[in-house]
Image (tube, rainbow, N blue to C red):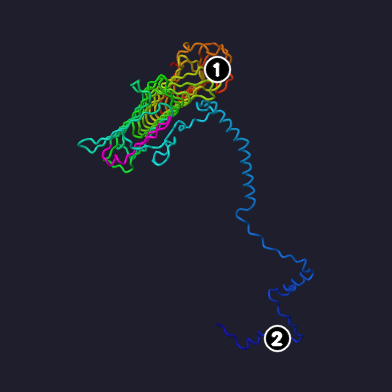
Amino acid sequence: MIIPDEDDTQKIKDQPVATPTIRCPERAAGRRPFSPLPDYETSQALAFSAFNDSQVTVVKPPRRRRIIDSRFWRAALLSLFVYIFLTIVIAIPIIVTKKHESQEQYPYNSLSYAVPWPNKNTASYYTGNINNISSPTSSGATLVCNDWTDVAALEGTTLVKSWAERYVSPNGEFSITSNASYMEDFNIVLGDLYVGINPNDTVQDAVISITMQSSSPSVFNRTLVCFAIADNITDLSLYVPDNLSSTDNILYNITLLFPQSDDSSNVGTFATFLPLFDQMFGSFGDYVTFKKVSIEGPMSRISVGGLQADKVLVETSMQPIAGEFYASDTLQISTIQAPIHANITLYNDPKSAFPTFLEMNTGDNNLMANITVLAPNKSPPSRPNFIADLRTFYGTLTTSLVHDPSSPATAIKLRAENDLGPSYVTLDQRFEGVFQASTKQAAANVDPGDLSLGGTDPWSATAGGNGDSGSRNWVVDFNSTSRVYGWIGWGQRPTYWTVDQQGEVVVDTSLANVTLSFGG
């Protein structure tokens, strides 16, 4: 570090000047030295001095922009309108076209006739509430219970055997019912019912009898067998105790015999509801005329020798149905997991406003039906004479439908459906109309039979016929491995006809073969 001498310091100092001294004012903050511009406060005052308060505008800060503003919603709404417009203009015509094509490909529905399917309970006739002994009967007759003709205890056992018999009018209404439960009383309550013709031709009344065997006096005393009998009304009701044990049992045997009278018995309604019974009906011939018949009962085996009525309902479960049936209005046969084997005759009055209906269905078993139809048409029918619907889930479906030798050609609508089993449907040479056989995972086959055996058009000389007396003919509209449909009849296929004037048969299954034949 160099320290100057005092002499050097004196030399460096400025020499005094004799002229006047000028002192500049101190520089304002932020102002450059000798700047010609006024300071900030002065410039602001000058700027606002020329404005009044009304000319001063307060500028607001801009709003924050939304993530999704109104322009987005306007665009979305516009897109929605465009989508709706395109749907109306393009999609709907395509859907209608596809539906029209589908109707052309699958135009055959045997249940398309606009008639409501009849209520299965229309044939039923029951005596009040079978589970409530105190409820009045539908006839108004008084119940008389446990009025036995004979009661006996079997020697050396606890069994009690009782028997009762009544002579009743062979006409009117009949009802035989039980409150037994097929779930709670299985293998505890068992019974047999037989309804037929009395072999003793000297008896002019109907005879109803019942035999009951109880496992103990206690069970006998708690079981009720009640008759309600009035003019042309016969009701038999069986009331089983609720608290039966597995060691208890009740056995019934019921017999109803109609007389062999020159004048047939007229039964307006005949109804049974007998769970756990075997119900057997003989052949009634001309001795009994039934109007409505209802045969029902879960776990009830049903067999019919020959039954004729306007309306017939036969319904059970887990047990087979077999027999011969003749119906002129409605025939319904139904069971579950059991076979059906029926010989059926259907009659349709051309003067009636409605067809004759047939419905048969079962599941997990075979369905076999031999159907004969009779309709004395005087001219081509303007509506279906017969509508039949047959269904099974797993089993073989075998159906034969032929005309009675005395019957002219009729209008038939038949639909047979199966799921896992094969289907075989045969119609005779008098059938005329459209047909379809289809399956999903198997083969469909249609056999027209020997067309030369079909003769000529039965209506060719009748007003309303197609006027073509040519031989039998068939037209195949579509033929593939799994589906065949077309038309079969006499002469040329009609150009104009309504769906009610021609027959229609549809056979459909899912996983098995389908065979439709017209050679029956």
The N terminus lies in which quarter of the figure?
A: bottom right
Based on the picture, tell me whether residue 217 belongs to the magenta stretch.
yes
Q: Which residue is mark 2?
A: 15
Q: Badge 1 is on which residue?
A: 380
In the rendered structure, which amino acid carries the disc numbered 2?
Answer: Gln
Residue 83: image x %, image y %? 61, 41
How far separated are the C-alphas under marks 1 and 2?
151 Å
Question: Does residue 145 sit above or below 406 in this rendering?
Answer: below
Seen from this angle, which residue lies furthest left? 156
Bounds of the magenta span?
214-238
Q: Observer-nearest residue: 479 or 236? A: 236
**Residue 340 visible in the displayed image:** yes
- Nearer to the camera, 84 or 135: 135
Residue 480 in the image: state x and y as whole percent: 47, 23
Tell me, yes or no, if residue 508 can be seen here. Answer: no
Q: Is residue 179 magenta?
A: no
